[in-house]
Amino acid sequence: MTMKPVEVTRRVALQATAAAGISLLERQARSADVKDVSWLAEIQRPPATVPATAPQLTELLVAANGERITTVEAWQRRREEFRRWWLDFLGPLPAERKIPPPALTIVDEDRPEGVIRQLVRYEIEPGIETEAYLLKPVRPSKPAPGIAVFHSTVNYTIRQPAGLEGPPEKHFGLRYAQKGCVCICPRNFLWPKTSNERIGTTSEVNSLAQRAPRSKGMAKMLFDALVAVDILAAQPEVDAMRLGAVGHSLGAKEALYIAAFDERIKATVSSEGGIGTKFSNWEAPWYLGPSIKGATFTHEHHELLALVAPRPFLLVGGNSADGDQGWPFIKAALPVYELFGQPSRLGQFVHGKGHSVPLAAEQRIEEWLLTYL
């Protein structure tokens, strides 16, 4: 029997966050003790020239009635309004999340240097299976940080972050497992089978529309990411209070959304996903759909960055999908971070090497995650 879609409410979208059992004040206290990356101030400086095409963004610290927001308490009320608007726009999650998370079937296992790498299969929706790679240190330091790693648009999908195929600089899952983290690398729903095959955007979008007609593609991606984080947090080696997310290109989009809507994610890196809705193909039906091109669509992703505050978020760009044109998003969200009275751990690193992950970006992504987790 097919399960009916469930409306995305505050309780549904953040039920596991509540289970984590940590208050805002506790998060602030813990965050205040963290040693920062040495280049934090650098990534908060505007570029020498902001492109003329960069968007003009609305102020975030203004209440719906026009009053200025000057306290965390007032921001939390405004934050809830932004959060509810975006969740309503995305539409229902395509299924109910199961607590505890779905059982894993180990399909394959090997042991590259210092790491146990498992290909696991699980039911992501009723009657629909997917796969992920789960990578753990052979001798983990318990409890270990956990990182959700989202692959880019390649037909070898999860083999990329798992270190089995593709350029080494994108082997994030393998690299961080070798650094002592536990990583999950879930397959994006656009690849329809539980084996590596070609992307199926049309077939998968049509299938989603049949079983969840009011759900946008990003609602499905958010749901799948939430389940992946549920699985990650349930691993016995993982410290559920030290979870992160990272992704490049397609994966960067998923990292942005999971960071915005899952407060369990304590540190995030989004590389070349296109922070602005006009910076890449966000209008595609497997993301947000064509309505974002209309004159009545007045929201932007600086609102999502504000939902992340005060948790660390690094935007990485090569002046392709992301870069100097993204500075207004950082500038708009920084005042929200500053409300929390601690170092504002938000910024962008522009390497200028196009839609890639050059060595300088590799190093900063790694340092960001390992510092803040």
Image: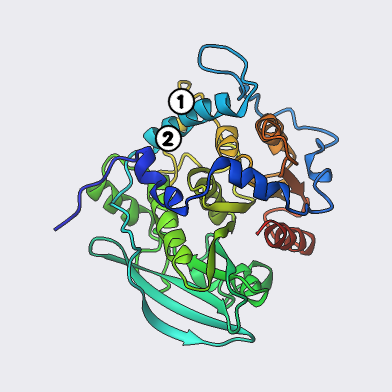
At 55% across and 47% down in the image, what residue appears? 256
Q: Name which residue type carries label 2.
A: Pro
Q: In the orientation shown, which residue stands out farthest toward the left?
A: 1
Quarter of the image where the C terminus is located: bottom right
Q: In the orientation shown, which residue stands out farthest toward the top?
A: 66
Crowd tier of the residue under label 2, counting other residues whose Cα lies within 10 Å: few below 14, some 14–19, many 20 or above? few
At 69% across and 29% down in the image, what residue appears? 335
Identify whether 162 is placed above or below 331.
below
Asked whether residue 241 is in view, the answer is yes
Q: Is residue 239 left or right of residue 175?
A: left
The quadrant holding residue 37 is bottom right
Identify whether 39 is placed above or below 214.
below
Residue 7 in percent (x, y) is at 29, 40
Disc sitting over residue 294 in the figure: 1
Element under disc 2 = helix
Q: Name which residue type carries label 1.
A: Gly
At 51% across and 12% down in the image, what residue appears? 65
Crowd tier of the residue under label 1, counting other residues whose Cα lies within 10 Å: few below 14, some 14–19, many 20 or above? few
At 80% across and 47% down in the image, what residue appears? 40
Is residue 71 or residue 325 the one in the foreground? Answer: 71
Do tag 1 and tag 2 residues touch (Cβ < 8 Å)? yes
Residue 66 in percent (x, y) is at 56, 12
CA gap, disc 1 to disc 2? 8 Å
Disc sitting over residue 77 in the figure: none
Residue 314 in percent (x, y) is at 68, 49
The quadrant holding residue 74 is top right
Identify whether 107 is placed above or below 263.
below
Is residue 41 or residue 216 the one in the foreground? Answer: 41
Q: Is residue 221 left or right of residue 63?
A: left
Which residue matches tag 2? 290
Identify whether 336 is placed above or below 323.
above
Q: Is residue 48 left or right of residue 142?
A: right
